[in-house]
Image: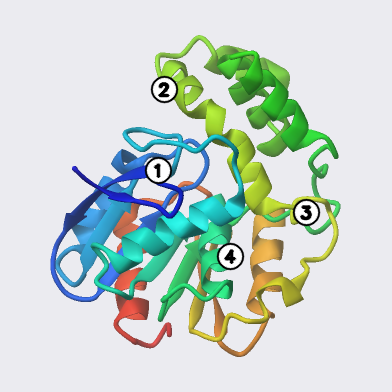
């Protein structure tokens, strides 16, 4: 493990492996750099792969007050430091939207790929409550981390209460609760894109680099719908549907598509 310091002085923990053009893997909700390790190993034969703990998670620090801009500055520190001044990005779930925001803001990103950003743009499932982020923030302020994780699973993932009640008894729940204090960060990154309304495509109109928009076709229908909408942003956005895949995709199924895209192959 190594670390870089973001613009506000926050220490961001990262690991680097492989050689070649730099690729930074951006995790979604609950994810730390450990969750990207298998994918990183598969990509390391072609790229310098950087995995990191988003602020407030794992071995990274955090700031006094959260802003999405701070997370973009974290990425910029990784791009300028271990990335060598330029890095392609892969974002998983809400991490894909963070990667989009960084690219739109002018970060040195020559190519961007994302998988199943959880947009809600139709009525196939309920939108997030209007006070979703505020409620998460209140739970975290009370250090009710398990309740925050449960609220995310019901409100954002749309799981039934009884399913989440069972999850709370599982061994993995403690790990989820440990990262739950950052769930409102993902909510702020997503903004109003889980409201049931069409995507505000002008939000990313400044993204002119090649973008690969990945989605499975066997998961929640609203995610594929959102991916199709995002792919309509411009001619530089390309949709790739992974047959039979859901929100959790095996790294061995994802790595070949990312390798082809990042090396300028037919998916570019």
The residue tagged 1 is: 10
Q: For the residues marked 4 and 2, what is the alpha-carbon distance in whole angstroms?
A: 28 Å
Which is more toward the observer, 212 or 225?
212
Label 4's element? Answer: helix
Of circles 2 and 3, the one toward us is 3
Q: State the image coordinates of residue 17 (x, y, percent, origin top left).
A: 15, 57
Can residue 245 be seen?
no
Q: State the image coordinates of residue 136 (x, y, percent, origin top left).
A: 69, 28
Among numbered discs 1 and 4, the one appearing first in the sequence: 1
Q: Is residue 110 above or below residue 182?
A: below
Can residue 129 be seen?
yes
The residue tagged 3 is: 192
The residue under the point 58% across, 65% down is 101
Among numbered discs 3 and 1, the one appearing first in the sequence: 1
* Callouts 3 and 4 close, C-beta under 8 Å: no
The residue tagged 4 is: 101
């Amino acid at each position: 493990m190594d670390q870089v310091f973001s613009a506000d002085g926050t220490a961001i923990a990262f690991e680097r492996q492989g050689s070649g053009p730099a690729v930074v893997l951006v995790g979604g909700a609950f994810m730390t750099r450990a969750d990207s390790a298998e994918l990183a190993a598969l990509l390391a034969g072609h790229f310098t792969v950087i995995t990191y703990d988003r602020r407030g998670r794992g071995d990274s620090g955090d700031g006094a007050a959260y802003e999405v801009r701070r997370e973009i500055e974290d990425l910029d520190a990784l791009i300028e430091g271990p990335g060598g001044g330029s890095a392609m990005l892969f974002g998983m779930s809400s991490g894909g939207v963070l990667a989009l925001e960084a690219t739109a803001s002018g970060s040195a990103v020559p190519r961007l790929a994302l998988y199943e950003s959880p947009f809600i743009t139709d009525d196939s499932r309920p939108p997030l409550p209007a006070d979703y982020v505020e409620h998460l923030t209140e739970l975290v302020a009370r250090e009710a981390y398990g309740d925050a994780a449960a609220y995310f699973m019901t409100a954002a993932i749309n799981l039934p209460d009884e399913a989440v009640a069972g999850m709370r008894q599982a061994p993995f729940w403690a790990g989820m609760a440990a990262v739950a204090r950052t769930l409102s960060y993902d909510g702020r990154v997503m903004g109003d894109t889980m409201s049931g309304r069409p995507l505000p495509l002008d939000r990313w109109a400044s993204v002119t680099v090649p973008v690969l928009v990945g989605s499975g076709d066997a998961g929640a229908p609203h995610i594929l719908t959102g991916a199709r909408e995002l792919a309509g942003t411009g001619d530089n956005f390309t949709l790739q549907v992974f047959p039979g895949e859901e929100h959790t995709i095996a790294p061995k199924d994802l790595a070949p598509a990312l390798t082809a895209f990042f090396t300028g192959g037919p998916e570019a």
